[in-house]
Image (cartoon, rainbow, N blue to C red):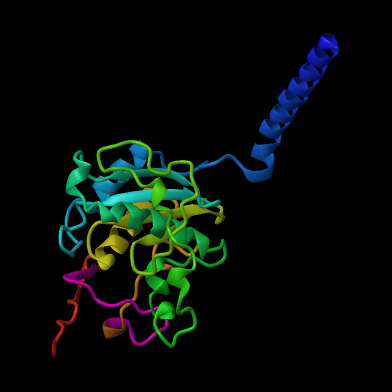
């Protein structure tokens, strides 16, 4: 009886090993290698620093205090970094926003249509067709890391929907979408400019080029369902566009 039990345990164990091996062999073919073709954390940090260098970016900090995150086509976080050596000096809340922007840009783009998060802004306003979208997929805060710590959702599907500037989809040179990039730490307008530059530095632009899903402003581009509000010290591609209107009547 004891010998038979041992044989059964051995058979079950062998089957488990075979199943694990088969799944390991099949997974890359079924789902593709995770994070393939996307920037590593070291590369992302380098691109982020270069994107803020020089002139042509406005906002509050000139795009120099940023979080950036990359997800693959499955929405899984592949990398996230800050632009500085001291992450505690970048807004802690921007970690979640950057990850959610990356998820959103990937989630609502396809190979034939790139939709930056900036282009979703008007759609989600009251009386517009996607009002309520922001509440559809909450971010999982269990996957946040302390600014100076480890962990934080790498290789996890965190979700989150953000519908203002700073998230862009990522593409192969052949035009296939492979993920999304999210940047946060300044105004939404500056976040978009930095994200656009990082994508270009990484060589992961959409088929239509780096400006095909660029941010638009009604004050200079005319009314559109893709319009995004002006921010403080708004610059686009090195050109000053204007400032966010001050509030009144409070």
Where residue 220 sits in the image (x, y, percent)? 27, 82
Query: Can residue 226 be found in the magenta stretch?
Result: yes
Residue closest to the far front? 1
Where residue 24 sits in the image (x, y, percent)? 66, 31
Where residue 181 sits in the image (x, y, percent)? 40, 54
For the point 57% across and 65% down, the residue is 112
Provide the major secondary structure of the magenta segment: loop
Query: Can residue 25 be found in the magenta stretch?
Result: no
Q: In this view, does 206 lie above or below 219?
A: above
Q: Which stretch did the figure color magenta?
A: 220-235
Which image quarter holds the C terminus?
bottom left
Judge from the rendering whether residue 60 lies leftward or rightward of residue 47; answer left or right: left
Towards the viewer: 43 or 75:
75
Q: Is residue 117 above or below residue 130?
A: above
For the point 40% across and 72% down, the residue is 119
Name the quadrant containing residue 12: top right
For the point 74% across and 21% down, the residue is 13
């Amino acid at each position: 009886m004891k010998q038979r039990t041992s044989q059964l345990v051995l058979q079950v164990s062998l089957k488990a090993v075979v199943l694990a091996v088969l799944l390991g062999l099949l997974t890359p073919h079924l789902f593709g290698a995770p994070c393939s073709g996307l920037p590593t954390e070291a590369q992302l940090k380098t691109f982020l620093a270069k994107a803020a260098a020089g002139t042509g970016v406005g906002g509050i900090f000139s795009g120099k205090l940023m979080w950036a995150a990359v997800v693959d086509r499955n929405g899984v976080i592949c990398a996230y970094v800050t632009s500085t050596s001291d992450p505690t000096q970048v807004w802690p809340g921007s970690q979640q926003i950057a990850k959610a922007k990356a998820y959103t840009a990937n989630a609502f783009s396809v190979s034939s249509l790139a939709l930056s998060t900036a282009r979703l802004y008007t759609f989600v306003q009251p009386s517009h067709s996607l009002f309520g979208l922001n509440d559809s997929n909450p971010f999982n805060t269990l996957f946040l890391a302390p600014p100076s710590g480890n962990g934080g959702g790498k290789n996890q599907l965190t979700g989150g929907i953000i519908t203002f500037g700073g998230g862009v989809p990522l593409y192969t040179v052949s035009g296939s979408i492979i993920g999304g990039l999210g940047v946060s730490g300044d105004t939404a307008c500056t976040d978009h400019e930095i994200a656009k530059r990082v994508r270009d530095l990484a060589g992961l632009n959409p088929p239509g080029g780096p400006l095909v899903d660029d941010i638009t402003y009604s004050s200079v581009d005319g009314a559109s369902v893709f319009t995004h509000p002006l921010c403080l010290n708004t610059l686009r591609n090195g050109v000053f566009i204007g400032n966010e209107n001050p509030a009144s009547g409070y």
